[in-house]
Each structure stands twice: as structure tokens, then as C-alpha cells.
């Protein structure tokens, strides 16, 4: 098997490359490429490991036909076009905890640096000025810290601030009252936070709701002399409004680690009294960088080599332990999806995926994604388990997953039923010997078959002589039959109803032969299938 190829396109701790190699991936380390340079090489890679500098745009994704996974060694993924990556079937992962302590500590360092104006005092002291009378600071003890965003980083900041004897109030619509009590902080609305906080620190992702959350209007609602820290994302603060507020004294100090445009080589804020900044160093400690590098490489290699999915933003998780158990189910699910997609005519409106017996004990989402991938393959070549659920949603397909506690005739069973404009169509399959996918029912008829290669599905009047006729037709056309499966409709009926035939053949069946088969006496349906 050829090794999956991974490109590390941002500066990353060398542990990442080591782990990729140890886990069976080939790795190239090329930090600092321009977008054009990245575009020129990305086509060679199965995985792309990044930090915040690489921008994964639709243009880059379009140039990456082999790409399967993007791994962000860090938290924020606003530099990746996730909807576009999902559409292309590329998994996007991050490392949600590896650098949170480090970033929280940076925010605390910013709070202390603002309170005591350490950067300016340091610069002037080293300049030989000894400006002892120019730097009157403030204590943080007893002051109110307003947290905007109390997730992983925000809650660590809260715990450290409580240790500094600050009072902490937080605005976070997703913070529960219980969690606030647990953290020892007070949950407030944004206006209350703005009015009460002596220091404000931001810890939300950049979304449509959080963009410019500190707008001119909201900055005007702050306590005069407030100090503001942003170690989250640049777009959270209106930088022009912040400049004005610093100039007017509404804001006594502001510390930014992140900017609207990065790298920020120039800014009206530079040189403003009370303003300090760092060049997106929030995650830059040895400890955090080792953490995120190890984690991203482990996660990406696990996906590329074993199919395990951890911390994906566009796919359900699947542990490396679960992955081998689920793999035969995915194969079964994909084939059932493909079969029902090939057989069902008319406009598909609903799909229901039922799991019974051992299948009911497994994670449902990956099985659902595999069924949809099989089904959607009829419509597009680039469908996989990542983008199939998105494509199904786009097409307005109503997807239902049902888990049955009851025991059925098989110790494990997956049934897929699609609702079409012509009624419901259902197929079911099991695993033989734990890993061998096998069809056990088609449109309510018990029929056992492997779903593999080229097949022919025939419904005919159940009368003597038909099997001979179809065998002769295929033989005359040089088509060898591999396997032959028969069932009767209604299920278990005696002769005289409808018979269903599923044949596997050694080559695709030419259209002319399909037409001749349709013309045979008693034939109702003939459909070539491919798996
Ligand atoms: N400066 C740096 O180097 C680093 C920056 N970051 C950034 O820090 C930010 C926070 O990271 P985590 O705490 O790990 O994320 P998280 O997802 O654990 O927490 C974010 C919190 O923001 C809250 N939130 C979402 N929308 C909100 C809204 N409209 N108003 C108020 N709160 C809202 C969420 O409920 C959540 O509790 C991210 O933007 C991340 O990219 C993370 C690491 C390093
Ligand atoms: O993890 C994050 O969200 C960060 O912002 C860290 O960015 P970086 O990896 O230092 O470029």
C-alpha cells in the first residue's frame, strides 16, 4: 500500500513530522509558502497540517483532488472554508484543548501588562530614562473582569482571575447557570458586562454573531477607563472605534494579540498610548506547540491510516477502536445505499436507515453517512462519507436513523428504505462471519447475495424455463455468470407469482443484451447494477 502523503504548511513543532512518519505517512514540511505555491503542490497530498497562517480557500481545495483531511494544530479554523471542504469530502479537524491553558495565560499576562503598563515602562527604562513617575498602575484585586465567551479558554481565564481575587462576570449565551456556579462566576447579559467590567477579555470564535461584538456602540457602553484584552480573533473588535476610544480616554488600555488583518504590519493603533500588542502569540509556548503538534499528527494519521475520526468539525467522531468494528458495516451500508439508489426510481424524498441486533449497538452516524455515500454516488463521482450528508441535505432528502432494540431473524441487520414518488423501497443486509456484507432482502423478498462487481437484477413471472432462457442469452453473448440468486414474491410464495433473480456476471452487460433480456417471455424488469 502506498503511504498517505501529508504536507505541513505552517511552522509546527517537529514532533508532528516524527509522528506522521512513525504512523506510516510520508511527510513534507514546507512552511511559509505563498497561496500560489501551495496551490501548485497541494494536488500531491492526502493530508494538510496547518496553523493559522495557511488559508485554505476554495481555490486551494479545487487544486487538491487527493486531499482527505485538513488538520489544524490549534483551535480556530476560521482560515479554512469548512463548508467548501465538506462539499469536497475533506474532513477538517482541530485540537480543541492543546493550547487553551497557554492562551488563557497569555490573556492574564495581557491583563497584568495593561494594569502596570509593563511594555511602555520597559521600553523607556531600557532607553535610559528611568521614568518612575510616569507609570501609575491599577491593582486587579477586587476589580471586575468581564468575560465575553466562557468556553474552554474563557473558563481557564476565569479560574486564574479568581486566583488573582478578581470578580468575574461572563456573557455567553451557551453558559448554563449550573456551569457559572461551578466556575464561581456570574452570568450576565452583554450590556451588564459592558457597564460593570473594569477589564474585558474576549474568548469567542469569530462568527456572524460575534463579529464586531465590541463595536463603537458597545464600546460606548463600557465603564470609562475600561481595559480590553483580545486574545481570540481580530474581527471581534472594531479597531477604528477602539483607536478613537483610546484617544478619548473611554478605554484606558487595550491589549491585542490578534488583528482584523494578519500579519498586521501597520495599524492606526500602533503607538497609541495605552495600546499594547503581540503578534498572535496566544498559543506560542513550547508546551502548547508540542501538545497541538502531537495531537494533530496523531489524529490525521489515525484517519489516513485507520479511518479513525477525532475532533472533526464536519464529521461524527469514530474512535480507532470503533473504526475496525464499523468498517464491514460501512461496506455493507454503502452497498445497500448504492443498491437502493440504483433500483429506486422516481424522486427520492426520504431515507430511513434501521439498525437491528449487533448493528444497533454501534455508532449510527458513520453507518448513516456510508448509506448516503452509496446512494449519492449515483449522482456524483466525488461523493464520500464526509460530503454525502451535506449533499443529501442540499437535495432536501429527509434522513431518519432508527435503532431497534428487538432481536430479528439475523443477529445483525441494516435495513435501508427510501421513500419515492412511487412508494417505499426497502433493502436489507447483514454480515456473515462478522465482516462479510451480504444482502438478505430486496423490496420485501428474501434473497441472499453478495453485492459485488457487475450484477443483473431481474423480475419475471415465476414459470418454468425462464432460468434456461436467460442463461442461454448471456452465454450466447459471451457473458459468464458468477453467482445466481433467486427469490419469490410475495416472500415464501409457491410458484406462479413473481420471481426475482440477482446474478453476478464477470463483465458489464452491454445495453443491447439488457434490451434482449427485457424482451424475453415473462420478464418485467431488467436492471444492470454495479458495485
Ligand atoms: N490567540 C491565539 O493564539 C489563540 C486564539 N484562540 C481563539 O480563542 C477563541 C476561544 O477558544 P475556545 O475557548 O477554545 O473556544 P470554545 O468553543 O471552547 O469557547 C467559545 C465560547 O464562546 C461562546 N460564544 C459563541 N458565540 C458567542 C456569542 N455570540 N456571544 C458570547 N459568547 C459566545 C461559546 O458559547 C463558547 O462557550 C477562539 O476564537 C480561538 O480561535 C485559541 C487559541 C489560541
Ligand atoms: O489555536 C488558535 O486558534 C490560534 O489562534 C493559534 O494560532 P497559531 O497556531 O499560533 O497560528
Image: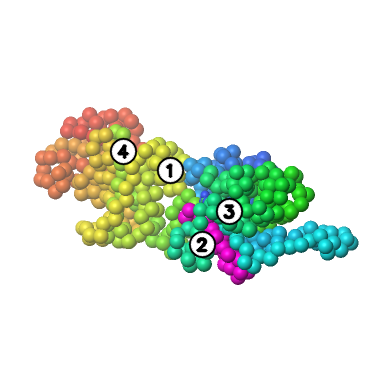
The disc, 3 or 4, on the residue closer to the chain's N-terminal end is 3
Number of numbered labels in the structure image? 4
Asked if residue 352 lies in the magenta stretch, the reply is no
Q: Does the numbered disc 2 mark a residue whose Cβ is under 8 Å from ligand 1?
A: no
Which mark is nearer the camera, 2 or 4? 2
- Residue 194 visible here: yes
Circle number at residue 349: 4
For numbered disc 4, what is the local secondary structure?
Answer: strand
Q: Quadrant of the C terminus?
A: top left
For numbered disc 2, what is the local secondary structure?
Answer: strand
The answer to whether the residues at label 2 and label 4 have Cβ atoms under 8 Å apart is: no
Which mark is nearer the camera, 3 or 4? 3
Q: Residue at x 63, y 41 (%)?
A: 39
Circle number at residue 390: 1
Residue range corresponding to the magenta coloring = 152-174
On screen, residue 147 above or below 214:
below
Q: Which residue is mark 3?
A: 195
Occupied quadrant, residue 112 = bottom right
Q: Residue at x 74, y 54 (%)?
A: 274
Q: Residue at x 61, y 51 (%)?
A: 222
Asked if residue 169 lies in the magenta stretch, the reply is yes
On screen, residue 8 above or below 378:
below
For numbered disc 3, what is the local secondary structure?
Answer: helix
The disc, 1 or 4, on the residue closer to the chain's N-terminal end is 4
Q: Which residue is mark 2?
A: 186
For numbered disc 1, what is the local secondary structure?
Answer: helix
Label 4: few (<14), some or many (≥20) within 10 Å? some
Which mark is nearer the camera, 1 or 3? 3
Amino acid at each position: 500500500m502506498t503511504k498517505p502523503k501529508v504536507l505541513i504548511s505552517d511552522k509546527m513543532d517537529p514532533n508532528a513530522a516524527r509522528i506522521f512518519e512513525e504512523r506510516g505517512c510520508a511527510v513534507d514540511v514546507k512552511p511559509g509558502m505563498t497561496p500560489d505555491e501551495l496551490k501548485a503542490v497541494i494536488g500531491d497530498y492526502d493530508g494538510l497540517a496547518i496553523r493559522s497562517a495557511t488559508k485554505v480557500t476554495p481555490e486551494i481545495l479545487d487544486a487538491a483532488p487527493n486531499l482527505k483531511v485538513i488538520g489544524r494544530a490549534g483551535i480556530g479554523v476560521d482560515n479554512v472554508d469548512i463548508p467548501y471542504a465538506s462539499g469536497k469530502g475533506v474532513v477538517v479537524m482541530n485540537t480543541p484543548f492543546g493550547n487553551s491553558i497557554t492562551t488563557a495565560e497569555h490573556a492574564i499576562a495581557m491583563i497584568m501588562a495593561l494594569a502596570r503598563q509593563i511594555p511602555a515602562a520597559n521600553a523607556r527604562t531600557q532607553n535610559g530614562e528611568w521614568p518612575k513617575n510616569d507609570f501609575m498602575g491599577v491593582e486587579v484585586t477586587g476589580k471586575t473582569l468581564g468575560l465575553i465567551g466562557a468556553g474552554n479558554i474563557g473558563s481557564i481565564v476565569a479560574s486564574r482571575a479568581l486566583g488573582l481575587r478578581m470578580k468575574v462576570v461572563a456573557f455567553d449565551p451557551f453558559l448554563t447557570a449550573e456551569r457559572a456556579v461551578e466556575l464561581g462566576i456570574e452570568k450576565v447579559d452583554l450590556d451588564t458586562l459592558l457597564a460593570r467590567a473594569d477589564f474585558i477579555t474576549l474568548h469567542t470564535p469569530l462568527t456572524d454573531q460575534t463579529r464586531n461584538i465590541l463595536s463603537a456602540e458597545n464600546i460606548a457602553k463600557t465603564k470609562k477607563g475600561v481595559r480590553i484584552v483580545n486574545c481570540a480573533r481580530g474581527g471581534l473588535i472594531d479597531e477604528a472605534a477602539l483607536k478613537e476610544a483610546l484617544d478619548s480616554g473611554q478605554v484606558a488600555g487595550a491589549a491585542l494579540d490578534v488583528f482584523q488583518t494578519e500579519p498586521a504590519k501597520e495599524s492606526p493603533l500602533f503607538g497609541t498610548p495605552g495600546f499594547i500588542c503581540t503578534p498572535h502569540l496566544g498559543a506560542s509556548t513550547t508546551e502548547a506547540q508540542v501538545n497541538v503538534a502531537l495531537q494533530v499528527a496523531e489524529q490525521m494519521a489515525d484517519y489516513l491510516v485507520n479511518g479513525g475520526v477525532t475532533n472533526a468539525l464536519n464529521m461524527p467522531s469514530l474512535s480507532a477502536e470503533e473504526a475496525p468494528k464499523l468498517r464491514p458495516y460501512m461496506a455493507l451500508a454503502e452497498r445497500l445505499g448504492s443498491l437502493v439508489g440504483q433500483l429506486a426510481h422516481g424522486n427520492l424524498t426520504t431515507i430511513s436507515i434501521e439498525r437491528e441486533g449487533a448493528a444497533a449497538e454501534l455508532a449510527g452516524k458513520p453507518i448513516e453517512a456510508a448509506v448516503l455515500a452509496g446512494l449519492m454516488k449515483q449522482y456524483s463521482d466525488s461523493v464520500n462519507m464526509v460530503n454525502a450528508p451535506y449533499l443529501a441535505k442540499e437535495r432536501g432528502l429527509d434522513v431518519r436513523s432508527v435503532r431497534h432494540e428487538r432481536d430479528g431473524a439475523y443477529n445483525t441487520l441494516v435495513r435501508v428504505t427510501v421513500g419515492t414518488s412511487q412508494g417505499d423501497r426497502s433493502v436489507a443486509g447483514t454480515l456473515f462471519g462478522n465482516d462479510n456484507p451480504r444482502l438478505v432482502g430486496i423490496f420485501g423478498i428474501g434473497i441472499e447475495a453478495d453485492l459485488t462487481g457487475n450484477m443483473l437484477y431481474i423480475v419475471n413471472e415465476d414459470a418454468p424455463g425462464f432460468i434456461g432462457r436467460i442463461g442461454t442469452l448471456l452465454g450466447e453473448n459471451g457473458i459468464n455468470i458468477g453467482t445466481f440468486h433467486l427469490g419469490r414474491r410475495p416472500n415464501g410464495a409457491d410458484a406462479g407469482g413473481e420471481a426475482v433473480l440477482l446474478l453476478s456476471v464477470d463483465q458489464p452487460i452491454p445495453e443491447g443484451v439488457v434490451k434482449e433480456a427485457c424482451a424475453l417471455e415473462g420478464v418485467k424488469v431488467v436492471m444492470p447494477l454495479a458495485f
